[in-house]
Image (tube, rainbow, N blue to C red):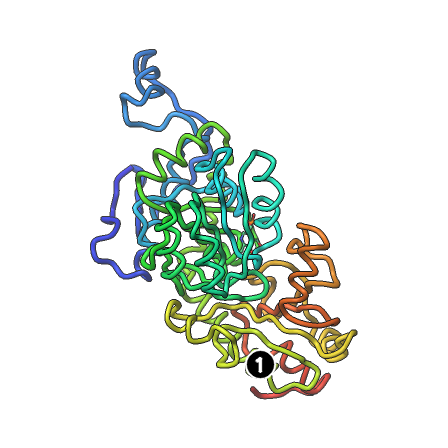
């Protein structure tokens, strides 16, 4: 393989997302090659032995390292401004590995209540089984962070904005308190994406992604990533991944490389669409409350402006009344897809709309308590809806349907 582009030589993010790490085989191909192999061949037993014991620097087994996966890792690390990246088979594999690789019995974890359901399950149900203490707090309260982090704490985990209630957590404040408590701050940056927020520059130690979301962005495959220092990725996370094996498939790594190439184009359009929808929903009588970090009415709008360069593609809203009649009109007229995947373009022209309580959703995987909490965060009996328009044309679907049932409108 020949490297054709020096990874980070002052290249801008838009260039990095296309070129960082690019390496070509002797065939001079235009697109990155896919190395669909599990292992490698050796000229001699000595070479095999030296490769496995690390004396020789070469790839030995795709559970540890694979050229296509390594290219994806290098490109995402460059985009994030991280020293290193390790890819995983899914976002939850990344969250799980980032937490468990650095914890042991007797340690303590602090996290906001507003988390994706499976993250809540790992922290609230799984970690305590292994003797790890856990405290959930209101992530928007500086006082609660101060109090929780006045005790020795090994890991703080948070999402900002959170899924699905779009709470914003003060990254630099929490990073400072975490370090004072002796811990590492792990940030799930899925909703912000590397385009709109750089947690490592604001004091976070580790960033995790579900690459399934915006990085792929086209509903094709699962993937995840953990980013941080060389020391963390090589010495703390590396052995954990090597021996437990949540490896990303080389094919999926290639799909995600293709997704990265257009990441900024897609998420900037998502965010523009989301802002338009959020402003529109604020005017509707059928909607009790709208949450979008870009709205002046969002409780942490000023903080979001300080730590993000854009506000993401997801809008949470609560229909007025139990049945959310306006929502049902929208569903009838707008041809919405009901799905659970933020950051993903479902089909051109079809916006996505999904439900938190009362309808089932992976966010409810943590059980009824978690669902109740999410419902409470966005209000009343109609539950919480989450709209993610993706990059389709701004004037279709939800807004048109809400406005008129069937008449086309301009927004
Ligand atoms: C904030 C957040 N983190 C992690 C995940 C898990 O990602 P995956 O579905 O790729 O395992 C999700 C999935 O929706 C998510 O929204």
- Residue occupying the point 70% across, 61% down: 372
The picture places residue 74, in percent across and down from the top left corner, at 34, 45
Residue 376, relative to residue 301: is it above or below? above
Q: Nearer the viewer, residue 357 or 271?
A: 357
Q: Is residue 76 in sight in this rendering?
A: no
Quarter assignment of residue 196: bottom left
The picture places residue 145, in percent across and down from the top left corner, at 46, 58
Question: Label 1: few (<14), some or many (≥20) within 10 Å?
Answer: some
The picture places residue 85, in percent across and down from the top left corner, at 37, 44
Figure quadrant of the C terminus: bottom right
Q: Which residue reaches farthest top? A: 45
Element under disc 1? loop
Counting labels gives: 1
Residue 130, relative to residue 341: is it above or below? above
Q: Nearer the viewer, residue 146 or 213?
A: 146
Residue 201, relative to residue 304: is it above or below? above
Residue 46 is left or right of residue 352, and the answer is left
The picture places residue 282, in percent across and down from the top left corner, at 60, 83
Figure quadrant of the N terminus: top left
- Residue occupying the point 51% across, 53% down: 111
Q: Is residue 25 in sight in this rendering?
A: yes
Q: Which residue reaches farthest left? A: 9
Q: Nearer the viewer, residue 366 or 78?
A: 366
Which residue position is annotated with label 1? 395
- Residue occupying the point 21% across, 53% down: 9
């Amino acid at each position: 393989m020949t490297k054709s582009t020096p990874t980070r030589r002052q290249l801008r993010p838009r260039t990095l997302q296309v070129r960082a790490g690019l390496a070509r085989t002797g065939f001079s191909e235009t697109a990155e090659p896919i190395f669909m192999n599990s292992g490698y061949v050796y000229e001699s037993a000595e070479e095999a032995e030296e490769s496995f014991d690390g004396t020789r620097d070469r790839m030995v087994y795709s559970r540890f390292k694979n050229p296509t996966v390594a290219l994806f890792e290098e490109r995402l690390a460059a985009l994030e401004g991280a020293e290193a990246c390790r890819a995983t088979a899914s976002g939850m594999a990344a969250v799980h590995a980032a937490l468990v690789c650095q914890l042991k019995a007797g340690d303590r974890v602090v996290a906001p209540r507003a988390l994706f359901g499976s993250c809540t399950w790992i922290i609230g149900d799984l970690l305590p089984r292994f003797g790890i203490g856990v405290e959930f707090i209101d992530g928007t309260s500086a006082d609660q962070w101060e109090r929780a982090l006045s005790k020795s704490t090994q890991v703080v985990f948070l999402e900002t904005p959170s899924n699905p209630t779009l709470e914003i957590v003060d990254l630099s404040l929490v990073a400072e308190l975490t370090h004072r408590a002796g811990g590492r701050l792990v940030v799930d940056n899925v909703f912000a994406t590397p385009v709109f927020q750089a947690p490592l520059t604001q004091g976070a130690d580790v960033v995790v992604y579900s690459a399934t979301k915006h990085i792929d962005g086209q509903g094709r495959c699962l993937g995840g990533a953990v980013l941080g220092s060389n020391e963390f990725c090589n010495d703390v996370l590396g052995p954990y991944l090597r021996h437990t094996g949540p490896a990303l498939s080389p094919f999926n790594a290639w799909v995600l490389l293709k997704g990265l190439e257009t990441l900024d184009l897609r998420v900037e359009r998502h965010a523009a669409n989301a802002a338009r929808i959020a402003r529109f929903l604020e005017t509707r009588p059928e909607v009790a409350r709208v949450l979008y970090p870009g709205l002046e009415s969002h409780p942490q709008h000023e903080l979001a402006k300080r730590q993000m360069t854009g506000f993401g593609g997801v809008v949470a809203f609560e229909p007025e009344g139990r049945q959310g009649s306006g929502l049902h009109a929208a569903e009838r007229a707008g041809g919405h897809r009901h799905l659970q995947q933020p950051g993903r373009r479902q089909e051109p022209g079809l916006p996505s709309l999904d439900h938190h309580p009362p309808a089932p959703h992976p966010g409810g995987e943590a059980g009824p308590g978690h669902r109740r909490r999410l419902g409470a965060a966005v209000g009343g009996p109609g539950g919480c809806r989450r709209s993610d328009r993706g990059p389709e044309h701004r004037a279709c679907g939800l807004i048109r349907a809400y406005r008129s049932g069937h008449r086309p409108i301009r927004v």
